[in-house]
Image: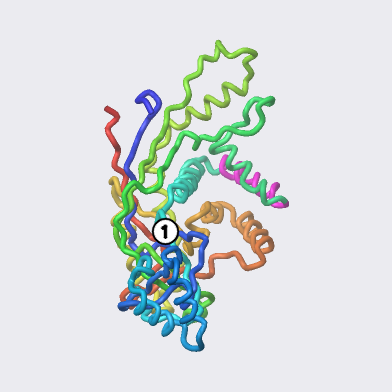
Amino acid sequence: MGEEIIRESYIVSIKPLTPIHVWSGIDHVYGVDLVDYNNKICFIDLDKIIGDMTTGIVDILRKEGDPLVKWNRVIRKYGERILGECIEYGNMSKISIGSKVKAINSHIIPGSTLKGYIRTALLYYKLSALNPNILNKVLSQISTSLTNPKNVSIGIEAYAFRKPRPIKAKGFIDLLQLVEVSDPLEKNVLLKLMKFLVMEPVSNRLQKVAENNVIAFFDGIVKHRLTIRNPPVVQLDRIHNKVSEHDDILAKFGEIKDVDLIDALGSFGCFIVRSELDRLSEIVKRIDELKDYYHRLTQWRRSYCEGVGKCVIGRIGFMTGHQAKTILPLIKSVDQQLYNQIIGYLSKLFNHVWDSRTLKLTLINNSLLGTGWCEICLERLSMK
């Protein structure tokens, strides 16, 4: 891309504050394609099982007995060459035969995941800056579209990011067409097998609602390149049969000049932190197990939300709750009735209670902490 096309370019570095999991869509099964070896949990690489090995391995596995004992016989016979990556145990020392383990995405945090998070952050940033009366008017468009899930976000998306193309062209242009996020250019990561928990506060205790075994991004760093392109330069007097939509489209694209990416990400991240602190403020008075998490959030708020820097806090990935993936907390803060309407609709649509009663947690050094918290740092690249 030439300099006249690129407006800004950044290296975006993401470091976990608590374990992060972005699911690949694949579940592994312990005792089938996951085994213990040298105090780690290792993948069986089926692509390495070739030729005469196949018959020998099948003969061992078809015999009666413990699957892990049989796989250990296979490994002793054929060596480590049949093993893929091996992962350290995290907050669990053993796992039951037949248990599923969610595989992490091969990119750890794909560019599409980061761009989706940025989109939500920008949406929050634009809406939270509105005059309350205008914000209520924009949000009111949600309630009129709840009968069709495909239309729920149309009004808000149209306000923040979209404009219709000229009638004959059909479809929409989108402001974030100008934002490109690569898959990681650099990865230096420590993965661990972690148990993620869904816990509901009940009286003075936590009740487990669900759990997932996941391969999690526990420590290290991933780096992406983020590029913001300049709006297309079009000489309107050269457009044949110019229509008003052309002006609207260029005006919408021109809004990219008003985007302060670091400020937007920082504002959204701190809003998520404050929302989580608000949820915990009363609960922590009666449940001691959550005090460490509450104190950690308070520390993060001081570190990331009481000054300006190139690093911000965020929450990304699987089991981070709709508070980190949507603008529902903002809607709740300005229109409780609309929030209740949306929650009721989503609960009916997905056939489970869609609310903020549960907490998504994992155990680290004997402390229960929220999953998916991360530090996001942006280093602006020179355009020379």
Q: Residue furthest top?
A: 237
Q: Is 308 rendered above or below residue 287?
A: above
Q: Is 288 rendered above or below residue 23?
A: below
The front one of 49 and 9 is 49
Q: Secondary structure at mark 1?
A: helix
x and y, in percent, of residue 322 in the image: 52, 59
So how many labels did they put on this image? 1
Q: Residue furthest right?
A: 147
* Visible residue check, residue 94: yes
Point out the stretch of residues depicted in magenta. 133-147
What's the residue at 46%, 33% (across, down)? 178
Residue 348 figure quarter: bottom right
Residue designated by label 1 = 274
Amino acid at circle 1: Arg
Examine the residues drawn in magenta and state their main secondary structure: helix
Along the horizontal axis of the image, is 168 left or right of 312? right
Along the horizontal axis of the image, is 339 left or right of 88? right
